[in-house]
Amino acid sequence: MIRDAKLWTWHVLAGLVIFVFLGLHMLIMHLDDVVNIASLNPAGGHPIDWANVVARGKMIFFPVTYTVLLGAALFHGLYGLKNILFELNLGDGVKRATTVVLALLGLGLFVYGTWAAFASLALARSL
Amino acid sequence: MLTAKGYPNRLGVGGWLGGGRWGMERYLYTLHRLTGLGLIFYFLLHILVTSARAFGEAAWVASMGRVTGPLFTVGEYLVFLAFAFHAANGLRLAFIELGWGVGKPFEPVYPYKTSVDFQRPLAIVALLLAALLAAAGTLDFFVLHKGVTP
Amino acid sequence: MDFANVKEVTYRVRRFDPDKDRAPHWEEYRIPYAPGMTVLDGLWLVKELHAPTLAWRSSCRMGVCGSCGMLINGSPRLGCNTQICELETTTVAVGPLPNFNIIKDLVPDLMPMLETHRQLLPFIVRDDHEEMEKPSGEFWQSPEELEHYLQFSYCIKCGCCMAACPTCATDPVYSGPMPLAQAHRYNSDSRDNGFTHRRQVLEGERGPWRCHFAGECSRVCPKGVDPAKAIQLMKRELVADYFKLREQRCPARLAETPKGVARREGIPEAPAPTVR
Ligand code: SF4
Ligand code: SF4
Ligand code: FES
């Protein structure tokens, strides 16, 4: 059983990592018309246009930072969710089950998301 | 945990919202909780939806097509606002909960000035930062907005 | 509100008799008002004039014993420390402190809080057992070292902070602001060496991790203890300890009696020590 002192410390550190990388993600995706960084959105138009997705997908920077963000955000979010649920005074069995379900959910999505990030790197480079 | 005797009188989830005097930080706590819940549920779906890019253009366009329309725009806008608040307030919390900005222990003299008062400037800065982010987002979402190129 | 012409106030009191009632209910009483009356004074009048069976705890009636914590117009406060006129209304709603079970009327069961307090070792823990059992002198402590914990040592264990804390509203596992602040009070005492013992509880589920700095505990504390400050400082210590960055500290040594100095004339001898 990892104790809360450790989990909470990493929860806060993950929060700071998210602050940086999600900040960047939001800058690219949602603040593109306010602060336009042309090199990250080379095809012009909307940031989620396929051409831009491919262009970003070619840079190794994105799969790597996406994976860091994915891991940090999943841990931060699911640990936060776990805390909120635990504060509801669940029974011990329910608590254990919740921990397992959330951990599996997190791991599963982390593996899938990481695969997707690197698969699209390969795909974009082959185009 | 200990067994207590007598009539149970815990406030329950309602107590998350207000138990005693309501202070600004209590609202921030509630909002942080709500926005956090919103963000994590959005994020779980977001992973699934955007992973479609690994399957090529058709899958990507189809996946994005499923999440367009005014309802999703408003939804995304709310997610952005939640992000703006949660990020700014989260930065403040990271500071405070590691013991910065709450003041040193000192002999309390009435009227008491507590850690809540000491960190108040941080709370205001966090709100301003959130407002700034939210304003930039609003500008982008509704004023300067360009659509996805068909 | 101007209390100059107020002659009467209304008390709404949350009543619960475990032998008769299924659930608590409100009852209303009107009592005469005189300037300077505290909420606790009013309760005595209610008992005298209307409800002889009304139960509550109080003792010192001067904010020292911590018995009379109650929910007054929605805020956890001390009955004896609250003037009716500062409530700005002539209706005084008094209930038992929430987040504790109700034993009777306004009497909360503080045992879980006090038991948690006890488990967090609210006393000086040291390895020199002999000195602890048979003290031969005083431990040395500077005024600066005193400042580190003095504020937290003003706690009177009234439980108001527990009643205000949103986490305590649902979670009986979380230790709550009072016991945590007291654990920090001893952790930050230069004479103490019990951090590693208290850490065993503090680094787990019962530790400070479910405090989210809603700050209510510090806002309601009648003694200015500022438990929220203690809890955040405690988190910092525990995180530092996790990264092995916590300052290692030898607990204070015995203060030595200065040698070779003579007592100035006219200063009387100190009284005989009371602790042997
Ligand atoms: S910290 Fe303050 S409110 Fe809490 S028990 Fe101590 S004196 Fe009462
Ligand atoms: S600051 Fe922490 S302990 Fe105090 S009321 Fe808020 S959540 Fe509870
Ligand atoms: S009666 Fe002692 S604190 Fe109020």
Image (cartoon, grey):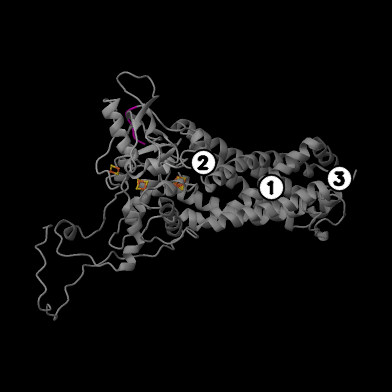
Q: Is residue B58 above or below residue A34?
A: above
Q: Is residue C268 above or below residue C272?
A: below
Asked if the magenta segment contains residue C233, the reply would be: no
Considering the numbered disc 2 on the image, is that residue within a helix, a strand or a loop?
helix
Task: Confirm whether residue C132 shows in the render.
Answer: yes
Q: Is residue C77 above or below residue C252?
A: above
Instruction: Locate residue C183, reporting x and y percent.
Output: 34, 51
The residue wearing badge 1 is: A114
Q: Main secondary structure of the magenta part?
A: loop
Instruction: Locate residue B102, reporting x and y percent.
Output: 47, 58
Residues drawn in magenta = B1-6
Query: What residue is rendered at 27% in x and 38% in y?
Result: C58
Between marks 2 and 3, how big is the CA–CA gap? 38 Å
Count of numbered marks: 3
Instruction: Say left or right for B112 vs B5.
Output: right
Query: What residue is rendered at 56% in x and 42% in y?
Result: B30
Instruction: Indicate the quadrant where residue C46 lies.
Output: top left
Given residues A74 and C50, the one toward you in this image is C50
Residue C5: assigned label = none
Instruction: Say left or right for C44 vs C129.
Output: right
Residue A83: assigned label = 2
Considering the numbered disc 1 on the image, is that residue within a helix, a strand or a loop?
helix
Considering the numbered disc 3 on the image, is that residue within a helix, a strand or a loop?
loop
